[in-house]
Amino acid sequence: MVAIIGILCLLLVWQILKIILKKGIINKNITDYALEYIVSTTILIALFMQESISRNRLFIIALLGIIYEIISLIYMYFRYYKKETITDFSIKKVIDECEFGILVLKGKRAKLINNKMYEILDKLNIKKDYITNIIKQSIDQLDKNYCVKVEDKYYVFVINNNEIITFDITEEYKLHQKLNGQNKKLKENNKKILLSIDNIEELEKEKNLLKLKNKYHDILGQNLSILQQYLNKENITQENFEEIKFMIQKMFIDIEDTDDTNANLENLIKIHKKNGTDIIIDGKLPQNKETAKVFFEIIREATTNAIRHAGSSKVFVNIKETLEETYMIITNDGRKPNEFITENQGIKDMRRKVKKLGGMFYISTVPEFSVNISIKNNC
């Protein structure tokens, strides 16, 4: 009798441990989980009522409990443990289903190769000396990796000692080639523009050539500067290519301003903000269209100069209008000039535009660099 009670106590303790164990299983079978409670409750009741239950019945309960535990352990093994066990076959199956190729070498021989890598190497007719032949058939080198053309697709091979991984970069590589071509054209156009600017003093007397110089200097020159700064960033990724392509295409479609000066100013603010420079406007452009256009062109030129010469990240524009005059002061948060400022073509153009409207234009370096303009409202 004592042995039977001891067996029932052990079965009860084991049932409690199983319930605790199954609480941590996410995808547990609810019926199986509830059955553990039923068996535990039955054994607990038998222990409390052992004096009123015959020895034979207690023996039957203990025997059924042992049989249940054996069946339960077998079920748990196949249901929860064995199902989650990772085997060599399951690992190979997962690797074979990968979209990228995997090759692991032992010396010069392939120790592990998945289906994708086997398919690519078969098309390249590479069956030995894998690393050497991959490098030989590469058409381009991207950093320390090699780009290989396979039929009409491009794959990059990442070689790390005896481990080789390859994946499809067809779209990215075509975009990379297109971008390189556009960069080449951009450099050629940049050289032409620089040559035009070098000779601009001789052409200043002619009105049409002066207009051409202003157009290139104020708009296209600015766009080239912004694009060049963008391309010089170290953290350019594949996701930036579409934005760079858009900037290049937009640059050569139309370099003329629109008739809406306020819209031009908003676009200027947005473009520079994407490039990391904030143009902060306090006030608004004058209502007079000609004056508003001159103010906008000076803001654009002053912003370009602030970025190029002072490394500014913020440009502050303060516009104040009275009954008689409209004032504008432009400052920035960049490096302060440490020597006398030589007026380049940009400053000369700003002065000329203000003078044409009968206004005042001067540059101040104390206490900070600023561009100051005042134009009478009846001009």
Image (tube, rainbow, N blue to C red):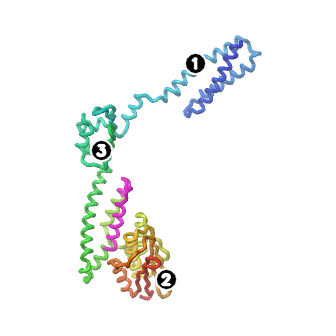
Residue labelled with disc 1: 70
Query: In this rendering, is residue 184 above or below 111?
Result: below
Q: Are marks 2 and 3 in contact (CB under 8 Å)?
A: no
Q: Find residue 341 and report its horizontal and vertical position in percent.
A: 37, 78
Q: Say which label, 1 or 2, has the lower sequence index.
A: 1
* Callout 3 amino acid: Tyr
Mark 2 nearby-residue class (10 Å; few <14, some 14–19, many ≥20): some
Q: Find residue 338 and report its horizontal and vertical position in percent.
A: 40, 75
Could you say whether the residue bearing mark 3 is in a helix, strand or loop? strand
Residue labelled with disc 2: 321
Q: Quadrant of residue 151?
A: top left
The reply to whether residue 260 is in sight is no
Which residue is at the front of the view, 69 or 111?
Answer: 111
Q: Say which label, 2 or 3, has the lower sequence index.
A: 3
Q: Which residues are magenta?
A: 217-242
User: Residue 155 — which label?
Assistant: 3
